[in-house]
Amino acid sequence: MKQDRNLIQTNPLTPAEFAALGAGEVAYIKSMSSDELMRIFPQAPKIESGLQLFTLLSADGAPILVTDSREAATANAWEHDLRMVSVH
């Protein structure tokens, strides 16, 4: 069986354009340990090992806030009019 497909050629986004999508508008919360935080963001200030933290991250994955409660991360997103999205 033959399928007809109407393909529309588009100009793909550059990596920089793709990374900028949602900048300043979209954020997500990621749970991580303080050890994982130090591995992913080595420039972060040194903190005690073994802590459970919540990071508020911008659409491109840049850290906005690190806190010890999901509620504080959510409140910060709301305070800055960021739309929260779920990342799987």
Image (spheres, rainbow, N blue to C red):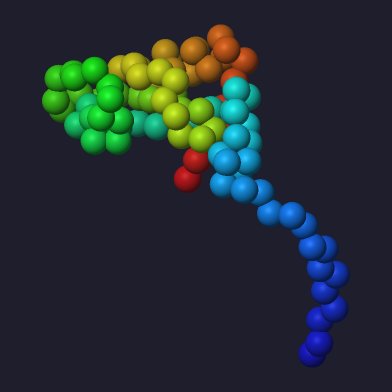
Residue 33, position in %: x, y?
A: 24, 30
Instruction: Using the image, determine if residue 1 lies above or below residue 41.
Output: below
| Residue at x 51% of width, y 35% of height | 60
Report the label total: 0
Residue, far top: 79
Q: Nearer the viewer, residue 88 or 59?
A: 59
Q: Nearer the viewer, residue 83 or 17?
A: 17
| Residue at x 56% of width, y 9% of height | 79
The reply, left or right, for residue 13 in relation to residue 38 is: right
| Residue at x 53% of width, y 17% of height | 77
Quarter location, residue 54: top left
Residue 7, position in %: x, y?
A: 81, 68
The reply, left or right, for residue 43 in relation to residue 84 is: left
Residue, far left: 49
Quadrant holding the N terminus: bottom right
Quarter location, residue 30: top left
Q: Nearer the viewer, residue 46 or 5?
A: 46
The answer to whether residue 54 is visible is yes
Residue 84, position in %: x, y?
A: 57, 27
The answer to whether residue 86 is visible is no
| Residue at x 69% of width, y 54% of height | 12
Instruction: Using the image, determine if residue 35 lies above or below residue 73.
Output: below
Instruction: Using the image, determine if residue 3 lies above or below residue 85.
Output: below
Quarter location, residue 17: top right
